Amino acid sequence: MAKPPTTPPTATPTMLRRVNAGKVLGVLTRARVMTGTGLIEATGLTRATVHAVCNDLISMGWVVELDPGRTSVGRPSRRFEFNSHAGYVLGIDIGAAKTTVLVSDLRGETVAKAGRSAAGVKTPSERTEIVHETVVEALASAEVSDAQVLAAGAGVAAPVDRDGNILVDDEFWRRFDAGLAQRLTELHGWPVLLENDANLATLGEHWRGEARNVDDLVVLLAGERFGSGLMDSGRLLHGSRGGAGEMVFLKLIEGVGDTHGIARIARENGTAAVADEAVHTSLRDLATDGEVTAEQVFRAAADGDKVAQGILQDIAARTARVVATLGTLFNPELVVLGGAVAEAAAALLPDLEAHLARYTSTPPRVAVSSLGDAIVSVGAVRHALNYVEQHALDLELSCRPV
Amino acid sequence: MAKPPTTPPTATPTMLRRVNAGKVLGVLTRARVMTGTGLIEATGLTRATVHAVCNDLISMGWVVELDPGRTSVGRPSRRFEFNSHAGYVLGIDIGAAKTTVLVSDLRGETVAKAGRSAAGVKTPSERTEIVHETVVEALASAEVSDAQVLAAGAGVAAPVDRDGNILVDDEFWRRFDAGLAQRLTELHGWPVLLENDANLATLGEHWRGEARNVDDLVVLLAGERFGSGLMDSGRLLHGSRGGAGEMVFLKLIEGVGDTHGIARIARENGTAAVADEAVHTSLRDLATDGEVTAEQVFRAAADGDKVAQGILQDIAARTARVVATLGTLFNPELVVLGGAVAEAAAALLPDLEAHLARYTSTPPRVAVSSLGDAIVSVGAVRHALNYVEQHALDLELSCRPV
DNA sequence: CGTTTATATATAGGCTCTAAATTTAGAATC
DNA sequence: GATTCTAAATTTAGAGCCTATATATAAACG
């Protein structure tokens, strides 16, 4: 997404109104319903200004006025509410295995949801097509039209720079990039904001996950392969080419050596144990064609299987080294583990924290994501909402009130 | 430095003037001398506004008006210049071995400089005293009074959070912290802005070093021990407790294992080689009491000594792993090597880059600092200047014009 | 039914900016 | 040396925005 070539913003009296309107709107998005007096206290503005701004926002469609409140003595107060149905945003997770689309109102409440497997997809255009179909399905089930959609956030497993450009040598992704955002915008009319999936996961955790009041944060996606999103003082890091949070360095970490994630290690080590005749384990009974899944290994460990438990201990030790590196180099307050096997990873926490204490006397807190597999799409919604809040006063709402 | 408890900044017409005055002042600090028309073009403001703002700034002492220009036809233009002698700032480097103080005018030109060894210093109060003495000496040689000093930046080798608080378990530093900033402010009257030394080095490189137009940057102080400053999109990272950039993780890196810097490794391995009777090296002739310095090892390598060259190759390999980790995890455009042995480190660059290419196909550029041992104090000056620019319109200048 | 109370609305005044008209200071021209 | 030209400064008028103050309004209370 190239930014529009705005002229150098010169401070004019008119932009005061913009600033103050933005402040009022910001308060209203975070609170459910506010009286005029409430807004005066929350914003520090004068009553006259607050009402003028609210009248503006109402005529723009961003705010609706409710019936006057009749709580106590005195003249009933005007009551204002953010018009969460002024428009909608989409959160799109374009994963390797699956594409997920969330339709959300402007307060971030999910209105509809659709998912589609990406198995067997070969070409960029096939992939774009899948995303398109999923979007259409989600919008239909939400009974929302393209005209009502103000923006869409979309997460991909590739480096994305601050302007939303995918930057990767891989030819497939390059062509995918060239196609996706433009094509979706052509088809539907709304802007598409690309971002790295781990970064969106970080936005998601910061917004509605375990990191709600934490501004210095690392989110570790630890499913098939490790990936991370880095947040410092509430801001996502990107690096010069969108590569911030890439985990290539794990190859250099003693006792880690690769970027394989928790699910992959569990699966591979479990399958290896099954193949080894000398090993005695209940995993062998669960295996199909000699292969076990990560979930089976986790379950077997929970049921007391020693071999499976050993695998988990190994994973905890490896993960502890990853967390220790990120925790000491970035000094986040919290590290959140997310991805496919997040809930199962909860069992790893005690072991992991014990290892962690060996590497640093001031370890970060470690938590397991509770957003499940929505972690990226929820973050994508937040990403789109950020855009909308930023540009609220420039956007035309399709559904102006009379 | 605790921030003053500012009221929520409400957007009033008066603050428009602040914004525009800040914009004009910003242009003037970066350009030497500007005409009214020049400022109109640079700021996008109207002539009326530009002149009103300039008149304000002149009466505040931030700007001086020169004789009208008489370049071409037409009415001569008023010419404005940033008053770089409206005040001064200090850049203080409180190193383990040495304290350095730079006195700088508001354009960042060094006016005077003083340094003092910290050898044999034991207590926090002794250390504070040394800093105080060095400051007094520097101010005297610059013929600048305390009243003219608007702020001082100070770098320490400890974690410092965004508010300038030293955060470290070590009792010595904790007491030092409690004393230093307050005591200097008590004695001299100007505010002291503490910051981590590697972070200041990063500011220095970004301002006047190798990273002048680079906003995604890592600076690696690699003298006695590795330390790093991290900048993403022009902003320094701090982490939740000021620990961002700490290099504890090096213990986990295969083939590194500790945070020893280039100088230390060179010295120790050189001395070890001298002690080993079986080794044939010219270092032995240079050694005193069987010990060699890092500088001697670098010189011997340059003179063709095979053993010294081997040591440097080892150092290059180790450093490459450090750079590879930071380069892939952060994705800076540039990594700058600085610290005591920076110039000597230039000899390592080819080897280092060759190793680097093995770890990543998109390595960052690597450069060697040319700021020498002023890297931290120059950054401290920049840190103080940032504060002054931020608060320019709130600060009282001691030397108002008539 | 008037008083009390909290809030909304209206009015006056002061900043700030822009835009357009007017003045000014020097150079070029006659 | 007076006139013209030019680019810039200065002045004036106008509009937007905010604050502060005064006035009006809609309920509850006695």
Image (spheres, coloured by chain):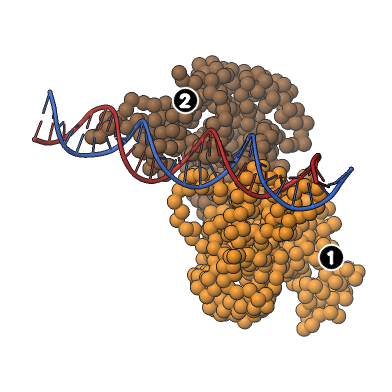
Chain colours: A orange, B brown, C red, D blue
Question: Which element carries disc 2, helix, strand or loop?
Answer: helix
- For mark 1, what is the residue? A310
For marks 2 and 1, give the one nearer the viewer: 2
Residue located at (38% from left, 42% from top): B41
User: For the residue marked with disc 1, what is the amino acid?
Assistant: Gly
Q: Nearer the viewer, residue B293 or B124?
A: B124
Q: Which residue is mark 2?
A: B59
Residue at the spot 54% in from the left edge and 73% down from the top edge: A188
Q: Is residue B95 visible?
A: yes
What is the three-letter code of the residue carrying label 2? Ser
Q: Locate residue C5: give its quadrant.
A: top right
Q: Chain of mark 2?
A: B
Q: Secondary structure at mark 1?
A: helix
Image-based side of B173 in relation to B331, left or right: right
Measured as percent of width and height from the top left, residue A18 is found at 56, 50
> Where residue B190 sits: x, y (%)?
61, 24
- Location of residue B124 by image quarter: top right
